Image: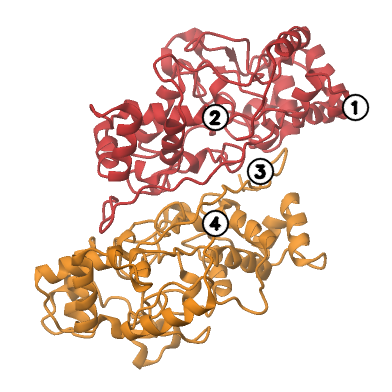
Chain colours: A red, B orange
Amino acid sequence: MKKQPVKIAILVVLSVVSRAWGMEPLPVLPPVPADNPMSEAKIALGRQLYFDKRLSIDGTVSCNSCHTVMGSGTDNRPVSVGVGGKKGGRNAPTVWNAAFLSVQFWDGRAATLEQQAKGPILNPVEMGMASAADAEARIRAIPGYVSQFEQVFGKTQPVTYDHIAQAIATYERTLLTPNSPVDRYLKGDQGALSSAAIRGMKIVEKVGCTACHMGPDFAGPEMPAGQGFFQKFPIYTENNPYVAKYHLMEDDGRFAVTHQESDKHLWRVQTWRNVALTAPYFHTGSVPTLDEAVRVMARSQLGLTLKESEVTDIVAFLNGLTGEFPDQTMPRLPQTPNHSLIPQ
Amino acid sequence: MKKQPVKIAILVVLSVVSRAWGMEPLPVLPPVPADNPMSEAKIALGRQLYFDKRLSIDGTVSCNSCHTVMGSGTDNRPVSVGVGGKKGGRNAPTVWNAAFLSVQFWDGRAATLEQQAKGPILNPVEMGMASAADAEARIRAIPGYVSQFEQVFGKTQPVTYDHIAQAIATYERTLLTPNSPVDRYLKGDQGALSSAAIRGMKIVEKVGCTACHMGPDFAGPEMPAGQGFFQKFPIYTENNPYVAKYHLMEDDGRFAVTHQESDKHLWRVQTWRNVALTAPYFHTGSVPTLDEAVRVMARSQLGLTLKESEVTDIVAFLNGLTGEFPDQTMPRLPQTPNHSLIPQ
């Protein structure tokens, strides 16, 4: 990964400058839970597991299948395809900078990256393992992994489902994209953004987008881990043609987690970072382009119909949130000589 | 990649030594076709394309999906899963060292890696693109690729299906695994193999396996590109319980290519390199373990029932053909801001 040396004094100044905008540059490090400290060995193990399709029942799906770190951190599909050609119910969010989110999944049902990582492996339409014990057994049958887990987690019960998730989450905390043009602009580089992008930046402030899309991930204010920043979507439903066209209200959102009426159609506010790369858009994946997503949001959240020139400027600004992706070594996955772990 | 400096003089000596065994260490470089010279930029482009799922109709399958270079160069499944959960007809052969094979595919229907690369992209049960023109259009719609293709292939028609295949094949020619214990043994390192592996080496010579499994890839004598080394499998079918158990004769093999009766059940001789990692075995992928594959081969090709101690020794020898896998940089795939190329 590229190193980003930053002086504390500069950070303090920037923090003041950027908060005036309601926008912040990406911090150098994301929050790290006290019970899962980072280490090089744990990152390397997590990277291997992230790419290892043996964590799916039939050996066809890894974390990277739907959240590809060679690209946008998504699969750029409306919804993902899991084992046996099964389709998921919601668009895959990006893994890039997810470490800054205080809750995970569209409905915020996981408090941490560790909890999130445990979901897809057991989801029948994603990786389809029958149980946590089966996932552990799959990994325990790979001698190279066992010695790596021992090195990282100690010799007592090294391979557990919790440890698998901890290693994956640790790798994910390295998936940050700093130094986007907007970050550089916020740090004082006036030439980092085009005039269209600067106009777009002013429009999103003025019309109210940044009431929600603020903070380091442009996904809400900083919250304690596990506490989500949710908003209703869509808010303006009357005479809103997008609701039917893009099936925006067929999914109850956070209601499915809490069963509270007030959580109907509540969603975690999504990050704007790298949003230009993560089409198609929304939980439905039904909106194909970023300019249309901007129109949908303005109409549905602010009751506004933007001028096309405003849409263009906002899209220019959002493109300025595409960051620098770190160089990575391709993992080498430990093998099982003489046999395969995938069921015949 | 690790560098392998080798002096010509040593190579000549080794060549004499190893030919006495009918076995050869892996050469430093594979054959390179005159019309597709290698370059760093072409290798980098090919690596990106190899991992790019946008070369499949629904964005779910890349070359690497079934021939994973983070592992064995296969998917360790009986048969692969392509777009829409469709299953292939034959077990995926390894991409590692495929550059040394004079023909590609189980039935040798492609003369070169370039021709091979053009198959799966258009195969309806693999990557499922409707036509070469569609694959070209997908890549042409990615500005980052267009400039890379221009750099590698020039400004006149840079993105063609032929060039896509040439880049992928060029990358594949870097996928070599030198310095296996057997290679080191053949070069004079007596301690590189266990005594069991050395016994196994003598057995495969004595019983006749190396009549076919010879040459740099242990897949036959060196042949001109496009000329395959084929053998009938199974040869001994009478009272051979494996024929029915593992469905060894349900596929006509090379006959499907040539429609000549003499090509029924003819198959390209498979490489032994890294064979310990490529379970399950044979065109069917129906034989789960390497020791069982050894029993099946002895019975079916030589009419022999080996002692279990001989099977164990041969498996030890074959494990000695697992090579060193080169370190690789993870490719970064050029993106298409504001929209996705995958059909909704």
Nearer-N-terminus badge (1/2): 2
Above or below B315: residue A179: above
Q: Which quadrant is home to the N terminus of chain B?
A: bottom right
Disc 3: which residue = B340
Q: Which mark is residue A174?
A: 2
Q: How much space separates mark 2 and mark 4, taking CA atoms?
A: 24 Å
Dots 1 and 2 on the same chain: yes
The residues bearing labels 4 and 3 have C-alpha atoms spaced at a distance of 33 Å
In this orientation, which residue lies closer to the viewer: A21 or A12? A12
Which residue is tagged 1?
Answer: A195
The tag earlier along the polypeptide, 4 or 3, is 4
Residue B338, can we see it? yes
Q: Residues within 10 Å of mark 3 (few under 14, many from 20)?
A: many
Q: Is residue A98 left or right of residue A245?
A: left
Q: Chain of mark 3?
A: B
Q: Where does residue B211 sit, x and y in percent of width and height?
A: 29, 86
- In percent of width and height, residue B232 lies at 30, 85
From the viewer's perspective, is the residue at label 2 or at label 3 nearer?
A: 2
Q: Secondary structure at mark 4?
A: loop
Chain letter of disc 1?
A: A
Residue type at tag 2: Thr
